[in-house]
Image (tube, rainbow, N blue to C red):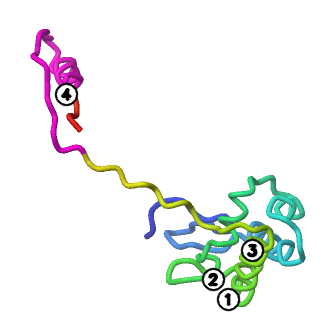
């Protein structure tokens, strides 16, 4: 059985994912509203859901809705692909590059020094916290 967050539109019954028909209808409605031209939040509002922009976007990109060995399908591949193509079209029309900026890699410090231990605690956890606080990176 999968661990973690259960996508909206499903329930677990006897260890198996099953479609929650009320929620699944809302998921399908969001795809339909988005493809008809509504924005993320307006698409969610049109089916009675108050969601953040990023939550709706993530929902439209959730591949579980296509179905797999664990999740039954809520939408078809054609609808999923159309929503992704529309997202990319809108992104390009707005002049956005998409994706997250690559994070600058920070070098992992490998040289350290530690000042002398001057305090002693009876509690080993306090002693450890104190000793660790004395460690400083040389880089």
Question: Distance of mark 1 from mark 4, alpha carbons?
Answer: 54 Å
Residue drawn at (74%, 74%) of the image: 92
Chain-order first, disc 1 or disc 3:
1
Residue bearing mark 2: 66
Q: Residues within 10 Å of mark 3 (few under 14, many from 20)?
A: few
Tag 2's secondary structure? helix
Residue bearing mark 4: 135
Question: Distance of mark 3 from mark 4, alpha carbons?
Answer: 49 Å
Residue 80 drawn at (x, y percent): 70, 82
Question: Distance of mark 1 from mark 3, alpha carbons?
Answer: 22 Å
Q: Is residue 30 left or right of residue 114?
A: right
Confirm whether the magenta stretch covers residue 117: yes
Q: Are marks 2 and 1 in contact (CB under 8 Å)?
A: yes
Question: Distance of mark 4 from mark 2, alpha carbons?
Answer: 51 Å
Chain-order first, disc 3 or disc 4:
3
User: In this rendering, which labeled residue sits more in front, label 1 or label 3?
Assistant: 3
Tag 1's secondary structure? helix
Chain-order first, disc 1 or disc 4:
1
* Magenta stretch bounds: 109-134
Residue bearing mark 1: 77
User: Which label was assigned to residue 35?
Assistant: none
């Amino acid at each position: 059985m999968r661990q973690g967050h259960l996508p909206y539109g499903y329930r677990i019954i006897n260890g198996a994912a099953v479609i929650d028909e009320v929620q699944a209808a809302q998921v399908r409605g969001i795809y339909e509203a988005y493809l008809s031209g509504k924005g993320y939040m307006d698409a969610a509002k049109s089916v009675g859901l108050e969601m953040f922009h990023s939550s709706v976007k993530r929902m439209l990109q959730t591949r579980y809705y296509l179905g797999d060995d664990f999740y039954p399908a809520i939408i078809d591949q054609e609808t999923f692909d159309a929503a992704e193509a529309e997202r990319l079209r809108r992104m390009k029309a707005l002049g956005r590059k998409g994706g997250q900026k690559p994070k600058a890699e920070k070098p992992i410090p490998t040289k350290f020094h530690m000042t002398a231990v001057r305090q002693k605690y009876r509690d080993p956890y306090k002693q450890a916290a104190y000793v660790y606080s004395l460690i400083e990176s040389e880089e």
